[in-house]
Amino acid sequence: MSREKERKQKILELLKEKERTPKELADIFKVSLMTIYRDIKELEKEGIIERKHGTVSLKENESNPQHCVICTKDIDGRFNVILFLNEGKKVHACCPHCGFMAFRKLSDKVESIIMKDFVSCNPVNAFTSWYVVGADISPCCSPSAFAFSDRYIAEKFSRGFGGKVLDFDDALEEIHRLMSLGTRIKLSL
């Protein structure tokens, strides 16, 4: 393996730990900034990394799968929930069910939450969405929770597949009630 390929591989390993500045990378590899910028540009073209505000980090996409903060399943883009925490951190959950559980544990740190509308797959504000909790189908975690931007659509879904139509606060409480006999979890961020 060439030195250049080896260095790029090690850059990716370092970025798995945390984001870095080009200067840090140049110092670690004892090469010029120009050399690091060339490596960064090539990795960026491949869609593996991204540059933001003077730092370099792994790009969050299907080639860099995220795991659910609650159940550790791989994230399926159709049900993905992103909790935006203060200090610019993000936490990913595999579905609204785990999103509610994560919110319950991290509520004092959460600034906003984005979920996917079950029908359109468009991102929606979790706090203003409607949910069907406890439907007869469960494509991810159980008890199931499905997010909808429109209450009318949530009610139609509920008529066909069962479950309760609830707003965010009531859905949060219903998931907690249904899970209350389960095991306690501790999140390490």
Image (tube, helix red, strand yellow):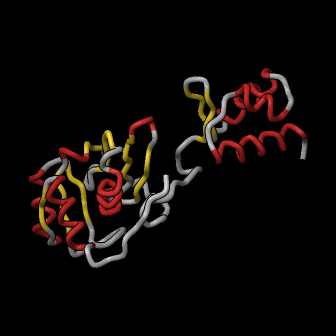
Residue 117: x and y, percent?
Answer: 27, 51
Residue 30: x and y, percent?
Answer: 86, 30
**In the image, 65: left or right of 97?**
right
Count of number-bearing discs: 0
Quarter-of-image position of residue 187: bottom left
Residue occupying image coordinates x 39% and y 53%: 80
Say above or below: 173 vs 24.
Answer: below
Say above or below: 35 vs 126.
Answer: above
Quarter-of-image position of residue 177: bottom left
Q: Is residue 47 visible?
A: no
**In-front residue for pair 108/95:** 108
**In the image, 5: left or right of 165?**
right
Residue 21: x and y, percent?
Answer: 67, 29
Residue occupying image coordinates x 27% and y 73%: 179
Residue 135: x and y, percent?
Answer: 20, 71
Residue occupying image coordinates x 27% and y 78%: 181
**In-front residue for pair 183/160:** 183
**In the image, 144: left or right of 45?**
left
Q: Is residue 123 visible?
A: yes
Residue occupying image coordinates x 39% and y 42%: 85
Say above or below: 147 vs 133.
Answer: above
**In-front residue for pair 140/112:** 112
Q: Residue furthest top?
A: 34
Q: Residue furthest bottom?
A: 181
